Amino acid sequence: MGLLLAGCAGDKSILDPAGQAARDVMIIWWVMLSFGTVVFMAVVALWLYTFKRKEVTRTPAEERRIARRWIIGGGILLPVASITALLAFGVPTGQRLLPLPLGEPPEVIEVIGHQWWWEVRYPGAEGGEVVTSNQLIMPAGEPVDFHVTGADVIHAFWVPRLGGKIDMVPGRVNIIRLEADEPAVFGAQCAEFCGAQHTQMQLYVEAVERDEYNAWLAARQTDELTSLAVNDQQHEPAREAFMTHCASCHRVAGLSSPGLSSGLSTAEVGPDLSDLGSRTSLGAGVMAMEEGAVSHWLQHHQALKPGNKMPPHDDIERATLESLGAWLETLTP
Amino acid sequence: MATTMQRLQLTHPLHFVIGLTLWCIWFVTVYGGHAVACAVVPPAPEQGVFTLVNALLLVVSLVAIAILAALTLGCYRMAKHHQGRRRFNARVSAGLYLFSTLGVVFAAMPILGIPPCL
Amino acid sequence: MTTINREATPEGDNIKGPHQLHSDLHEIWGNPRGLKALTIVNHTTLGLRFMVTGMVFFLLGGILAMLVRTQLALPDQDFMSPDIYNQVTTMHGTVMMFLFAIPMLEGLAIYMIPKMIGARDLVCPRLTSLGYWCYLFGGIILSFSLVLEMAPDSGWFMYTPLSSSEYSPGLGSDFWLLGITFVEISALSAGVELVVSILRTRTQGMALHKMPLFAWYILAMALMIVVGFPPLILGSILLELERAVGMPFFEVAGGGDPILWQHLFWLFGHPEVYIIFLPAAGIVSTLIPVFAGRPIVGYGWVVAAIIITSFISFGLWVHHMFTVGIPQLAQAFFSAASMLVAVPTAIQVFVWLATLWLGKPKMKLPMLWVMGFLIIFVCGGLTGVMLALVPFNWQVHDTHFVVAHMHYVLVGGMFFPLIAGLYYWLPLFSGRMPSESLGKWGFWLTFLGFNGTFLIMHWTGLLGMPRRVYSYETGMGWDIFNLLSSMSSFIMSAGIVMVLLDIALHFRFGKPAKHNPWNAYSLEWANSMPPSAYNFVSLPTIETRHPLWDDPDLPRTMAAGQHSLAIATHGRREMWGTDPLTGKVREIIHLPGNSWWPLFAAMALAVVCISLLTRLYPLALIGVIVAALFLLRWSWENGAHPKAAPDAEVAPGDPPLHSRTMDGPGLWAMSITLLANGSFFLSYLFGWFYLWTVSPEWRMPETSPLSLVGLTLAGVALTAGAAILEKLVRGLRQRKDAGLAVGMYCISALGVVQVAITLWVLLSANLAVTETSHDAIILVGLMYALLHGGLGAVLALLQGLRVGYGYVGAHAPFEPAVVAQWWRYNVVTFWILVGALAVLPRVIGS
């Protein structure tokens, strides 16, 4: 997987685009800024100049003519010309983000916002749907349609270096089309205020080459993940602890599927953990994934991310949490 | 035509608000009509701009433009025939009708270039 | 044109001389002291109270802002917990918008408008007082949530489902919804009376096109409040019903839609920005001619720009919602409309420029703040046009770029002109001049601090920093810019403290001001400094836009009682009622005096608000009834009541008292109130049709649960009542009052019939209001009809009683005409409701 940066990896700058949509917006921004600066300077300079000007006596007719010239020139022609240019410039750019029909249907990735983590689904994966959380791997160099929605409150999906944001509204599916030029890691963060931990709702986004993407998906097929989860005998106690304490909210492929079995609504489940060990961070960007990190998180998550929806684990023995952590870290397809 | 314009009393300051009220009604009609059309009979995305929805919106806009332009002209002419308060009212109304007319033209331009329901 | 001018004649009452006249007027208009000061209804006193209270809330909002900047100064700070931080940011926005900006500007308008248009008070003085108390109590209730650490924390625009009872279980959202609705009563009442005052009480001769520009701006602002606030009131009521009772208006599973809240909020929220900006621009348009020493060029252009702004601003609301997934064509309409608003703004900027260009501008302290406004506001306007572009908006929406833009527009567009205006009018408030040197320090610190804070913040946003995050990690390139912003914000705070200090100190140490110190042109400078409670001893005829420039002697002759209405022996508070277009005198308006009822009514409403918060619903119901009784008792003291104007005698040659005509200001106040009510009703219809067509899981029963026969019968009763009322009013117009009392009782009875049948329809519909949004929203519509019908019946009953007491009749025919408007409105809205709720679903089906 190459580049693994600590915590929330990747830059979020709008001015450092990595896709055509974001690049168009950046160009528009610099053009608007230059033009705006000229207008701004001119208006302010004219205003200041009126205080320095020598007095001239004029007839009322001359005064009327001068006033009309200012008002029509500056008050009407200038804004009308500017906004017409802007609209002519802006509308085609907006159309690039539309999910217009393509010759070949683009890859579809579903992203679902939860308080305060991301559920990511790949419905088109060969061999069955793939599910993961808090990381989004996408193919580079081809358009991808993101179908987004919210499970509880309104969130917003935004990968600044690829393009604009779109709200994740409960009960609706919004679509945005983005394309990454080449393989890279991007930062992303929930953009619509969604409650206490809006800040710590980060998403790791990585664009990879198409074959690497296919391989990544293949490694996350249910069978592969199941054999990963249950193979090693030494983790049997951890698995039992998982089934006792965690399985009603968290899915690990082959062991639990909370949405179906425990009768929880989609708003109440926790992140899918089937490939937890392969992720770069924990708690949607709260801390970097390294040895012992999961166990640390399990013990202190309410201090690390106050208010998050996982209950505190004070009632579980430390050794159990450590063994759980060690096992979950092995889930690296 | 001339008598209708006279009956409208174009020097009354009520005309300050009629033009923009019409603009608002046009805006609500177009926005609301578009939303309902997209909810009830959305055209296929492949059709692009050439859909019944775009055509209807365009017709509504042209009607609004025609009405507002006629009123602009009426107020402009009326201003020439009066002095003082009435002249002021008619001139400001003419300006406001002109703005409303161009406001419809400007805000309706996207109908020509954007497919309706995406 | 008949000019009424009873100048000092030997037989006149002012033979006693101006001093006697002054003390006579003071006797009638003067403010009581001690506990009775709570009864004051005078616009000068209440305007100052509004402004001082607004400043206190401004300090609160400012402290919250400093807490935010402290938290964000460095990465990974835990100065505040996430929970507290969210409360602080939410309250900062809420306090600044609802408890500072709007009430402050309203206070200024309440203070200035009568003085500028040559009136002695606003036209509904007791309403001013009610507005102030509602504002004060609502503000205190809302702020108190901070003390309890239970403040709202879902952001100042309260998006649901985050603000719903499921995701915000505490009382925070309830504090916001109830407190803000309470404060909005204040905004609406000020809006209504400012409109009527400006249209109907200008001094004689002041035709619409001779009115000071400030009055045009306030007229537009007030009408925008009247039309713009009701959608939020509706939204707040629906959300509070969802939270308290469980009616699923915004909950997808119950057939609601969270986006409906966003529409209702921004239908209010965008006009709100211009409600704040227009009066501030009005200050600029007032000051620039004074300091340029010449009339403004393009008066008509400015009037047109004001009207355009006030309309277009209602067509922009969706630009706050570009990312919610609305089809691109719809977004393009709003994008274009948002850009259109640049035109009227540019017209104003260039009118101001041309005025300075053709004048001899002087850089006095108020002008310095105007220049600060210009620089900041033009910058904010430019980023505003950028944000109207949809693709750019998708990138920077909800980032610190938007935070920066918004502060450029609001601080630049409201705070700087406000301080310019305060400095300009300080000599009028106090009779003293502010200190130039302290004032300049204050300006430069505020100006530099502001730009340091927010100019940099644009860049932070472009680097991808989202808004409302309580902290951020190092390594994103945001650290240094946040630190600079935070440091600058403290410089700005120091500047603001200096300004406030200057203003506070000047009341004691300022040099006494000479009369009309800036050589201004408008009538407020014809007041004594500080002004008397009745403003003017005599009311002049004004036929120019610059009365004090054209007749510098005017203040003296006005104070000497040489113009109209210089009479006090009748013991009434009097001023002119004039024609809205021409300024011809039509009647004498007599105003009510000081009263306890507004305070009592506001206290009862405060009890309602607190008991709703604490879920003591029976107490809330009692509060509502008590408040209604107080309000009705207040309305009893009108017309020919002994406390109002028992005898109708006027000086020979003067027009009649308004309560003896068919067209007093009360009629206009009722029309404007119904305009607000209509806006509320349209918002409701929008909600109904929106949920019906757009809501993802809308469920509508096969057959409408409402009995069409019942509703038709109720509508017939209502229409019959209204028809009888119209006939009675026609009779009164010809001074015939035979059978008036009986007629009124009949009308009231028909109102009761309508209410009873509607209630039966409601009860027999067996609505499952907590299960589907369809049933819930029908309930709200029928409740609306019931309340309106009930109030119509009560008003008709009271009119019948008043006829018996002799307060209403051929001699005082005014009030039935006011009640008739209410009934007419009821008939129209009731039939529309029947059509929308009961007929259309039967015709179209689900």
Image (cartoon, rainbow, N blue to C red):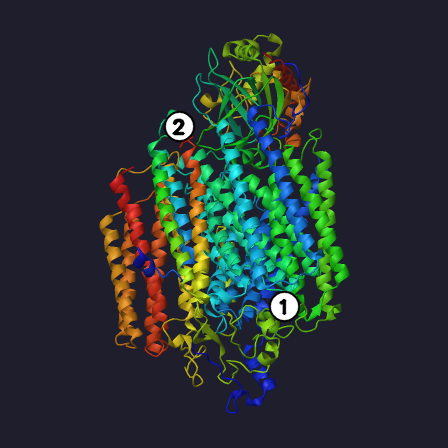
Q: Can residue C44 be seen in the rendering of this structure?
A: yes
Q: Position of residue C327 (x, y in %)?
A: 44, 34
Residue B48: image tag: 2
Of residues C61 and C133, the one nearer the viewer is: C61
Residue at coordinates 68% horizontally, 71% vertically from top-left? C431
Residue at coordinates 43% horizontally, 22% vertically from top-left? A101
Say above or below: C833 vs C541: above
Q: Position of residue B6 (x, y in %)?
A: 33, 60
Say above or below: C488 vs C642: above
Dot 1: what SS?
A: loop
- The type of residue carrying mark 1 is Ala
Q: Position of residue C493 (x, y in %)?
A: 71, 51
Residue C520: image tag: 1
Could you say which quadrant of the image residue C520 lies in? bottom right
Q: Which class describes the residues within 10 Å of circle 1: few (<14), some (14-19), or many (20+)?
A: many
Q: How far separated are the C-alphas under marks 1 and 2?
A: 60 Å
Q: Is residue A55 left or right of residue C676?
A: right
Of residues B81 and C647, the one nearer the viewer is: B81
- The type of residue carrying mark 2 is Gly
* Pointers 1 and 2 in contact (C-beta within 8 Å): no
Dot 2: what SS?
A: loop
Q: Which class describes the residues within 10 Å of circle 2: few (<14), some (14-19), or many (20+)?
A: some
Query: In the rendered image, which quarter contains the N terminus of chain B?
Result: bottom left
Could you say which quadrant of the image residue A236 lies in? top right
Q: Position of residue C71 (x, y in %)?
A: 69, 40
Say above or below: B101 vs C753: above
Specify the subunit that label 1 lies on.
C
